[in-house]
Amino acid sequence: MSPRGGIEICGVGAVTGYGWGRRALWEGLRSAKPAATLTRGYGFDHFDDADVESGKSDNSSDNSTVSGENCGWVARVPHGGDSADGRGRFARAMRAAAREAIEDALRRGWCRGRRVGLLHAVVLGEVDLWKDFYLAERGDLKAREYLALMPSTPVSTLMQEYGFHGPAMNVSAMCASGNAGLLTAKLWLDAGIVDDVVFVATDLSLTPENVRHFVRLGVTVVDAEPLDGCRPFQEGSRGFVMGEASVAFVLSRNTHAGYATVLGGAMTHDAYHVTSIDPELSQVRRCLTEALDDAGVSAGDIGYLNTHGPGTRQCDAAESTLADELFGADTGMYSVKPLVGHCQGAAAAVELAVTALGYEYGYVPAPPRVARAHPKLRNGVVDIDDRLTLKSSLGMGGHNSAVVLAPPE
């Protein structure tokens, strides 16, 4: 069992653009082939420049169309799941990921406690069903189907399925929601509120309308192959390719077979701008140093920086600046967003899963470098030893978060 202060990730489940299941995620990353595909309806050939506030956007884009068929690169979750889990892709993915994590933890020897809590990180819920509700169904639904649109419903049905009776709630901190949820779960466990936590982060929000507005902001690339357009910490990066995911973890001290140990972390807020990072970086810096302090480790103990790394100008500049300022030359960094996509509210959770599975398999499948890069950026498969990982995530609107992970006890 983990000592006081360390929480074990003892179960992992995933639904991503690579497919349904954590094996599909890991094999997709190992292939070094992006999950994104050219998808009809996501190529945009004109934009309103007034939508991009002068001096505030991350990047500019030539915004050209991909093809005459209006196709663009996105990493959507493919069709699948159990129809009994709900009408929408969101609920089906959420319950599938959670179910896989729970069954995985039980196989690995998790001893479920009396009070199992549930945390669900979500920014945008059933976007497909809400769109249909207003535009196709004209608000005319049966009461049961209407209730399925609520973010509390998949949480409630999962609690019923397993007979969990701990607290259950949603958390939301934009792209930092995964880190925020994991740290909230640790707080619950440290405070003795629960014996175990199932934590799920879900974002299946890639409607053409949503993607188009991120392209208008100048941060999303749809008109280039992912490894060409999204190059975190490399020359020529234009932003990120958008993705979808639902990722789940079981967190407990009642296990002898974890994937990774959560040592600690921190969260801060810039209180500066709705999209841009404070150029002073004071709150991002404080977040990283307080995460190290909370985990009881030093910067020299960190072997790997699993970065937010969206490939946008300001985020990459912020993280590379602090990587040089706070960490030594032998601390490597990587971002898997060129491969799995930027999964928005589930992004940090996908990337936490990569670290957890990396400790299990002994390596991390970082994306290949394609241009001149920051010297700390790792290239391709990274053999991972027993050194610690710091996972950072910078959510739009000023949400800063960092989690320190170690190999399992």
Image (cartoon, grey):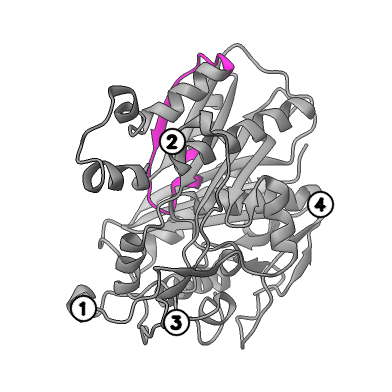
Above or below residue 291? Residue 278 is: below
Mark 4 vs mark 1: give the one in front: 1
User: Looking at the picture, how far across and down is residue 78, in whole percent?
Assistant: 56, 53
User: Looking at the picture, how far across and down is residue 99, in whole percent?
Assistant: 62, 31
Give the labeled residue for mark 3: 66
Q: Is residue 386 left or right of residue 86?
A: right
**Magenta segment range?**
162-183
Q: Is residue 199 magenta?
A: no
At mark 3, the secondary structure is loop
**What is the residue that sits farthest to the top in this orientation?**
114
Measured Cα–Cα span from mark 3 to mark 4: 37 Å
Q: Is residue 178 magenta?
A: yes
Give the labeled residue for mark 1: 48
Q: Is residue 284 left or right of residue 361?
A: left
Measured Cα–Cα span from mark 4 to mark 1: 47 Å
Q: Say whether marks 1 and 3 touch (CB < 8 Å).
A: no
Measured Cα–Cα span from mark 1 to mark 3: 18 Å
Give the labeled residue for mark 2: 87
Seen from the viewer's position, the closer of residues 113 and 281 is: 113
Q: Residue at x 53, y 63 (%)?
A: 341
Amino acid under disc 2: Arg
Residue 361: mark in rendering: 4
Q: Is residue 193 visible?
A: no
